[in-house]
Amino acid sequence: MNKMKSTWIVAGAVALFAGVNPAAGQMLINGAGATFPYPIYSKWFDQYTKVDDSVRFNYQSIGSGGGQKQILAETVDFGASDGPMSDDNLAKAPGKILHIPAVAGAVIVTYNLPGNPVLKLDGPTLADVFLGKITNWNDPRIAALNPGVALPKVDLIVVHRSDGSGTSYIFTDYLSSVSKDWESGVGRNTSVKWPVGLGAKGNEGVAGQVKQLPGTIGYVELAYAHQNKLPVAEVRNSSGKFITPSLASVTEALATAKIPED
């Protein structure tokens, strides 16, 4: 949603470049940061070695906060962040840092239920799930959005990020936009005080917890749901339409994105 009022959350990953120092022979380019773009980064890096085998990439998928910290500390050649660095952080940099939009994708809601039916959810219901106000899968509000779906009478277990995360910022920004209670009680940030749930590190960790633990619900970048064969929820947009997260719908949502000149 990222203020685009689509359905789920669309956001971009930004590469932060501070200059690469070539070395004799094979060149090693070190990077670190967001887990959000890691699936496509790993494919790109592998493909690039087929074009030029004198270059190797070493990318550590540690979260957006880590990517910004390491580029400021000059311990990597590039960092990755789901959101651009603030003017304050840029002012702390020892040299010029360039923001380069690299890839965009969707933060989606995934879950683990018997048979993994396709569920429909809306913003206020999602906010109350992550606030801990809805605690069972057969809650009347979830049932009303999913007529005909056999929802089990089991506890609903929230899984959220435990590390500083651009994915969390995207998701909490959305929850803040659809719920006054979330906005005033928790807010939007890369790291928040989660009212309920289990913490996991990285998109990988959240996807892994949801896949392994029945009754869970979490948020990840769309590719992590596909890689782990996890279901994705259809979320109602501001026009009242339930949208299925897919390559086509993400691309359509991105048509309204505004990218700053810098």
Image (cartoon, rainbow, N blue to C red):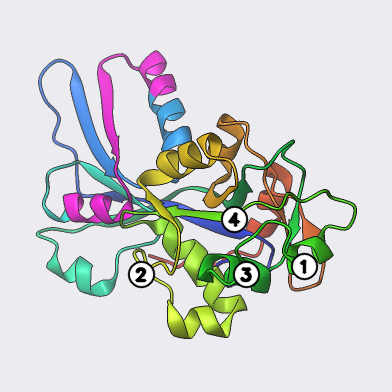
The reply to whether dot 4 and dot 3 touch (C-beta < 8 Å) is no
In the displayed structure, 195 sits above or below 247; it is below
What amino acid is found at the position of numbered circle 2 in the picture? Lys
The reply to whether dot 1 and dot 2 touch (C-beta < 8 Å) is no
Element marked by disc 3: loop
Q: Is residue 246 magenta?
A: no
Provide the residue designation for mark 1. 140
Q: Quadrant of the C terminus?
A: bottom left
The reply to whether dot 3 and dot 1 touch (C-beta < 8 Å) is no
Residue at (21, 74) in percent of width and height: 88
Provide the residue designation for mark 3. 4
Q: Nearer the viewer, mark 2 or mark 4?
A: 4
Residue density around tag 1, few if under 14, some if 14–19, many if 20 or more, within 10 Å: few
Q: Earlier in the sequence, mark 4 or mark 3?
A: 3
Residue at (10, 19) in percent of width and height: 24
Provide the residue designation for mark 4. 156
| Residue 248 x %, y % | 73, 45
Provide the residue designation for mark 2. 193
What amino acid is found at the position of numbered circle 3 in the picture? Met
Looking at the image, how many numbered discs can be counted on the residues? 4
